[in-house]
Image (tube, rainbow, N blue to C red):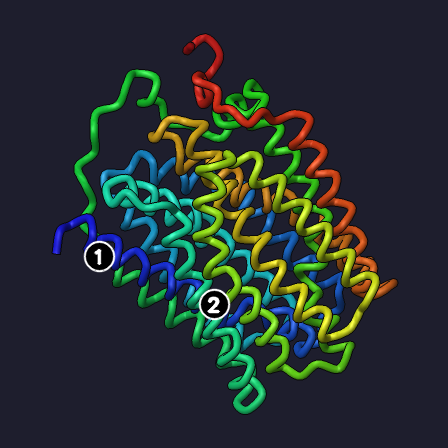
Amino acid sequence: MPSAHRNLSILRLYYMLMGGGGGFLLPFITLFYQQQGLSGTEIGLLSTCAGLVALLAAPLWGRLSDAAARPRRWLQLELLASGMCMLLLSRQTAFVWMMLLVTLEALMNAGSSPASDALALTLLSKARSGFGSVRVFASLGWAVTALVSGWLIGRVGLIVAFVGYAVGYWTNAGILGRVRLPKKEPHLPHERRRLGVRQALRVVRHDRRLAGLGLALIIFGFMMYGLRTFEALYLKQLGAADVIVGLMSTIGATIELPGMLWADRLVRRHTAARVLRFSFLLEAARLSVVLLFPSVPTLLLMRAVGGISFSWYVVSVLGFISNSVPDRQVTTMLALFNVTLPAFIRIVAAPASGFIFDRVGAYWLYALGAIGSCVAWVVMKTLVRDSVKSSAGLLPGEE
């Protein structure tokens, strides 16, 4: 089998296990916190601490990965440590120990997502495939394991979710050793610059498209944060069983299977900026339906619509960034947008959304999400052109 096709098969398996590990745990993590006696405000505080650490750590991991001769070693370390932290978390009842482990996991796992996506872009450039054709396997893994995990949790307990997460991440650490990376090609002088945090922020500040993207993602992420955190608890309040919570995640992830491939075609036809605007409008529409008809069947149906909007969001954001900066700076810029920026949002939004949940419940979080989606669309429409700037990714004076 040619090296490019072999790498593509390994990469798809890697993303399927990554999504599978997340599907085992992440839809149920809030249920675990509630089972341990935490309030919405305390859950938000955990997220705030993790976000603060990720805010600082993600660009550093990205810079290490960009500069390292063997960036896979850093990624393998992150995956092993993340699985171990989550297993230890499953045995904790004291809030202080839970906070310590959540913070440590955020520190070690902050760079895994951008490093994985940067590795995918490197390998896909040789295989001539779109990112959606690989990312779809993460959705497949999530779709299967979220449903299985919900069923097992109802019979065995929440420990199943933590074990499944650790097994998925640890297996991926081993799989990475099977990837055959291509030799690094020489870079132009301005591409040899490895971005630090300050340099990355300078690039964003001086590039109207990247700045507009950042502002839109901040608004959208802040207004959607509480909904993503407490939606499982809202389902439980409406009378849904654990298996229904898993089913909702499975429905969304299953719809992402064709959604990711569709997103690849849309980005090629309409540009990443336009597809991202589509995703914001679709998200606003589905949240408005939940506000009008709040019930378990409505939430399940609208999660299917959310699978499409999420697919468009993921593929368009990555495509936007990868087309806007030199290859040598992609991992650091992905870390800034996909980890540091969400971490900043988490620091502010987590306690605020926890407070709102404790006071008025999860229903009004849907209204905030719909408003945020609309405002993000306006920002993208106003500030971001569909064409790609030829000087994107360069610091002032490098043009």
Point out the image quarter for the N terminus. Answer: bottom left
- Identified at 59% across, 52% down, the residue is 309
* Of labels 1 and 2, the one closer to you: 2
Task: Check disc 2 and give the amino acid type.
Answer: Trp
In the rendered image of this protein, does residue 167 appear above or below residue 189?
below
Residue 337 is situated, as x and y percent measured from the top left of the image, at 53, 39
In the rendered image of this protein, does residue 215 appear above or below residue 34?
above
Q: Nearer the viewer, residue 314 or 397?
A: 314
Query: Mark 2: which secondary structure?
Result: helix
- Identified at 30% across, 61% down, the residue is 173
Residue 102 is situated, as x and y percent measured from the top left of the image, at 55, 61
> Is 47 on the left or on the right of 81, as rendered?
right
Mark 2 burial class by Cα count in 10 Å: few <14, some 14-19, many 20+: many
Circle 1 sits on which residue? 177
Residue 259 is situated, as x and y percent measured from the top left of the image, at 50, 55
- Identified at 45% across, 8% down, the residue is 397
> Is 234 on the left or on the right of 336, as rendered?
right
Point out the image quarter for the C terminus. Answer: top left
Instruction: Answer whether labels 1 and 2 touch (C-beta < 8 Å).
Output: no
**Which disc number belongs to residue 125?**
none
In the rendered image of this protein, does residue 276 appear above or below residue 305?
above
Residue 320 is situated, as x and y percent measured from the top left of the image, at 49, 34
Query: Mark 1: which secondary structure?
Result: helix
Circle 2 sits on which residue? 142
Task: Check disc 1 and give the amino acid type.
Answer: Gly
- Identified at 49% across, 73% down, the residue is 24
